[in-house]
Image (cartoon, rainbow, N blue to C red):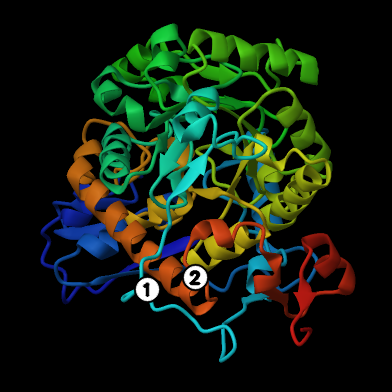
Amino acid sequence: MPQYLVERDASRCIRCLVCVRQCPYEATFYDAQTNEVTNRHQNCVMCRRCEAMCPTNCIQIRQFGSGFRANEHWKEKHIRGIYKQADTGGVLLTGSGNDQYYNTYFDRMVIDASQVTNPSIDPLREPMELRTFIGRKPERYDPAKGGNGQAKEYPNIACDLPIIFAPMSFGSISYNLQHGLAIAAGKLGTYFNTGEGGLHPNFHQYSKRAIVQVASGRFGVSAEYLRSAAAAEIKIGQGAKPGIGGHLPGEKVTAEISRTRMIPEGSDAISPAPQHDIYSIEDLRLLIYAIKEATEYTIPVSVKIAAVHNVAAIASGIVRAGADIVVVDGFRGGTGAAPAIIRDHVGIPVEVALAAVDQRLRDEGIRHCASIIGAGGFRSSADIVKAIALGADAVYIGTAVLLSVGCTLCQQCHRGKCSWGITTNRADLLPRLPADVAAERVMNLLHAWSHEIKEMLGLMGLNSLESLRGNRLKLRAVGMTDEEARILGIKHAGEA
């Protein structure tokens, strides 16, 4: 049974065939004998490209039929999954982030506002500082050494706003989108992350705005790759699929991706689940310092982990192993491809992970030794403000970036046929998202969020991001249990 139905108003259809040309999933056909445009509904993925491009607005896509017989235990998703696996015998793959219903803590936290005794600050009339420095800090300021001396001792990267583009490899996203992110990062004063796909030679000009990733497959890793970057990141885990590796199908490994990842064209790029040289904190320390030696201690080294039950203890070990940055990726994080069963049922929310990691590092007196970056499903500037109040120094955004350039969350990223040109490198689809358009739209989004963050800082009576970091008194819980509020380290609404 098809999942979606493509409805076309024949009286308004002018047979321009735009919908036929725009659909990469072969869901729309033109019959020259009858002069009719018809559909193979079972191929439709509801990407809505045909709807958006139709000049007469004669197309509408909706759910097919009345679905399955109502059953509170067996939802449509379960039934379709079983039917599909019985047909194919394979693991169900999906893209994007976890779309299951779980309580979202961000939606049950509200932000404090200044009134009378602690006046608010108007960001239009007074300076407001969003710049943050990411990396290890000295335990205390020593005037004898001066600021420059400290910077040399502990390299930091300066972000003009607390938002960094999440790791998305060339291959999982298009060449043009990664190019657009590189352009936007430079103009915004922030950074983009290469993911585990290496850095295309054409993007070396943006390398000082690149955080380069070293993952279990070691794709694209070289001494030049590390030395040219602003920071290096060791990927241990990913929020969308904790505990498993990655897989870029061979059909997506084009000549350019082959060149960048340093693998044969057309071959599967399979990342092992673990890093095969890391089985302990001591092993991790060896890799951290190998990268520091290779880069002559000039760039910070980050370690990215998925948010899991004992994330705080793991983060403590990572910091003690010498990492300058810890990235905590929550279970709402996106992915180019993951087994649906893993994406939907493994990991914990980034909100509780951030609170636990920040508190653990403070309790152990090592919070200054590393910055914390939160990742995994940030939907708005309010989510970011709350994350920083819970203890993050900055956040990664990925799905929000994809949405800003036209993604409709059809969750077909793994198929390499993205009709919007976002997660494909197919020659006929790539031009649908020009790099300059991607850069402009992403910059617009971050400009808007920056204004909103300044407004929220001002209403809390704060004039800098540094004053908000870990300041949980600025948050209150609404509709949480005492235990949830305790874990997050915040008070209930109504408590002074």
Nearest the viewer among 263 and 468 is 468
Query: What's the residue type where badge 2 is placed?
Result: Leu
Judge from the rendering whether residue 84 lies leftward or rightward of residue 401; answer left or right.
right
Residue drawn at point x = 37 percent, y = 18 percent = 228
| Residue 354 vertical placement versus 421 (above, below) | below
SS class, disc 1: loop
| Residue 423 vertical placement versus 198 (above, below) | below
Residue 144 sits in quarter: top right
Tell me, yes or no, whether the two marked residues, 1 and 2, touch with CB atoms within 8 Å: yes
Query: What's the residue type where badge 1 is placed?
Result: Pro
Q: Where does residue 337 sit, x and y in percent of width and height?
A: 54, 37
Q: Where does residue 106 sit, x and y in percent of width and height?
A: 64, 67
Number of numbered discs overlaid on the protein picture: 2
Q: Quadrant of the C terminus?
A: bottom right
Residue drawn at point x = 67 percent, y = 34 percent = 369
Q: From where the camera sits, is residue 271 visible? A: yes
Q: Earlier in the sequence, mark 1 or mark 2?
A: 1
| Residue 95 vertical placement versus 15 (above, below) | above
Nearest the viewer among 86 and 296 is 296
Residue drawn at point x = 32 percent, y = 42 percent = 185
View extreme (right): residue: 483
Residue holding disc 1: 123
Q: From where the camera sits, is residue 48 visible? A: no
Residue holding disc 2: 457
